[in-house]
Amino acid sequence: MSAQTIRKALGLLQDDPDGEDAWGDLREALGFVSDAEPATPKDFDLSLEELYDLLGSALRAHEARREHDAVAEILRFLSALARGTPREAGFVKELARVYDEELLSEEHATRAFTRLAEIAPGATDAEDALEKAAAKREKWNELVARYQEEANGANDSSFKSSLLVRAAETLYRYGRGAPSTSDQPESLRGGAKKKKKEKGAAANGGGGSHPALPDMIAKLSEARTLDPRSRRAAQLLERVYREEGRFEDVAATLSSFAMETSAKEEKVAGFLRLARVLRKKLGAEERAVSAYEQVIDLHPGQQEATSALVQHFSEKEMWEHLIALYDEQLAGGGVPSGQEAGVILQIAMLNWRMRNKPEAAEPYFERLRRTEPAHPGMLEFFREQAKKSGDTARLATILTDAQRSLPDGVEKGKLGAEVANLAEEGANAAKAIEQWRTVLRQDPANKDAREALKRLYRVTGGWSALADLLRNELERISPDDGAQRLPILREIAGLYRDHIKSDSALVTVLSQITALDPSDAAAVRELVRVYDALGRWRDLLTAQMKLAELDANPETKTDLYRQVARRWLEQFSNVQNAVTAYEALHEVDGNDVEASQKLKELYVKRRSFPQLYALYEKQLPSAEGAAKIELLTEMAKLAAERLDRGAAAIELQKQILALDPNAAGVL
């Protein structure tokens, strides 16, 4: 069995309790073979308790509208589902009461009371009801005659009305199987009979039009004339007319009773049934609308009446009527607690979109704003109005309130960005910065917020804040990701150099740049400048050496190496570092006299004879004449005396003889 089928059928029956297709679907889903047989066992895809709740809720709704046929049918389902359990007796007892007191169905009431006596032995109310029914069944025609006779002699209109109603009820309950009019007592005779509707016949245990129909109608009509507030008279007369298909008479009866009765619940139920008859049986939509309006006057917010009126006014585009309906519900307390905002929104949207009257909609949107500061529809209205009026300051206030009401998240971030943009458009940079910073705190990955803050800090000269922002961005990037880190580091370096004027902070940033990109000559050159300004000489010399390696200009290279070498010697007396610098200088310019002389001195001083020999080797190709002979002589001496390279010394001496056969001391 499908729970969805049951829910759908019950929903359709709430709208039309006469819907035979819906009743058929419900019977089939619950396992009913026929009206006379109980439900057959079925596998339900919801629990029995859930099923009881569903049917019980539907039953109460039908009961409120006095739709007793539907009430009896649902009670029959509940009784069958509870068969053999302690709950069955309660359902059967109520079913018997409805058949007996409301539907006046002798056959069905007897069957229900009999079942109640079976499952609840000693139930005196069931036994008493069966005994009374049997006694009345035997002399019902005499009862009718007696009630009529007493009514004829009664002076009190209310009492006379009640006697006539009793007579009519007895006729309705027992007179269905009576002989033809000519064989009946005088009180049962009447005009031509009409064929009874199948539904009414089934519910009351017989078929065909009621033999005493004209007499019943006459008695009930007189009873209502005597006592227009008689619920029993109106109820039975309505029932008789329904069974005969006389729906105009049904409508007239319901209208009269609903107008006359003083009980609010009876009035509401009467007007609801009247509206349904007018819509579904007579197709009188306008008259049905009037009936539903009567319901709303009595019970603001009544669901069925509200839905029907909303649908009607919407289809007819009667927006003023629809707004008035919603307004009355708000004023009359007809809106369920917690749903006021939805109704206020409906009124606001109708004025805005349907009537094109934003000035009428604004008070309702303001009212909605007090309860739901971040309602999307409300915010959209104020955005559009601000666009037309140019009042962005008010919009910013509204959006700020909305932002505060939201928890941290995407939506709050979007509103913050919108407020920031408005502030920026209004030349309120401080406000814009504050908003963008809030957005960034909530969403550190928000790219728009970062770019906007960068732009605003540059415009306002907030260089330190911009540097902090860039450093924060840097922290979100892997230390090894040079491609992403280098552009940010270079931007920070520019801030420290050009705006913040902090060489000490600049050193740290430049060092990070050169660590990621050792070939960045501009960063190294800037380090040279900063170290010089800060007097950090050792760091300066290291940076100058690095810059000399990177610079492509030979003159610049030689100048840098010379400066480094001299300072290592003169300022720090560091021969090793001076040698390294002079060697680099000599590598760039092998003819540099200072480099050659200093290296020779330093090599001799440090007894670095292999290095001195290598220096001479490099100088040899460019030497000529006496200078070359002198160089060869020095090399031969080093080879023989310091390097233990006799063969090389002999070869060098031969080169000297080749240049000068008379060279002293060679032979």
Image: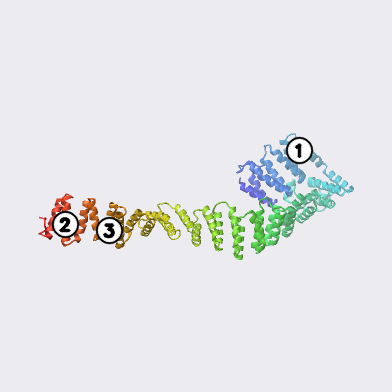
Residue 507 is at least partly visible in this image: yes
Q: Are marks 2 and 1 in contact (CB under 8 Å)?
A: no
- Residue 325 is left or right of residue 572, and the answer is right
x and y, in percent, of residue 176 in the image: 78, 47
Q: Name which of mark 3 and mark 2 comes first in the sequence.
A: 3
Q: Are marks 3 and 1 in contact (CB under 8 Å)?
A: no
- Residue 505 is left or right of residue 126, and the answer is left
Q: Name which of mark 2 and mark 1 comes first in the sequence.
A: 1
- Viewer-proximal residue, 177 or 219? 219
Q: Quadrant of the N terminus?
A: top right
Viewer-side label of 3, 1:
3
According to the picture, the residue beneath numbered tag 3 turns out to be: 585
What residue is rendered at 63% in x and 46% in y? 29
Residue lying at the far top of the rendered structure? 122
Q: Amino acid at mark 1?
A: Ala
Q: Amino acid at mark 3?
A: Leu
Q: Quadrant of the C terminus?
A: bottom left
CA gap, disc 2 to disc 1?
144 Å
According to the picture, the residue beneath numbered tag 1 turns out to be: 126
Q: Name which of mark 3 and mark 1 comes first in the sequence.
A: 1
Q: Amino acid at mark 2?
A: Leu
For label 2, count other residues whose C-alpha is less than 10 Å away and answer few (under 14), some (14-19) or many (20+).
many
For label 1, count other residues whose C-alpha is less than 10 Å away and answer few (under 14), some (14-19) or many (20+).
many
Q: Mark 2: which secondary structure?
A: helix
According to the picture, the residue beneath numbered tag 2 turns out to be: 632
What residue is rendered at 65% in x and 47% in y? 26
Residue lying at the far front of the rendered structure? 570
What residue is rendered at 68% in x and 42% in y? 78
Residue 170: assigned label:
none
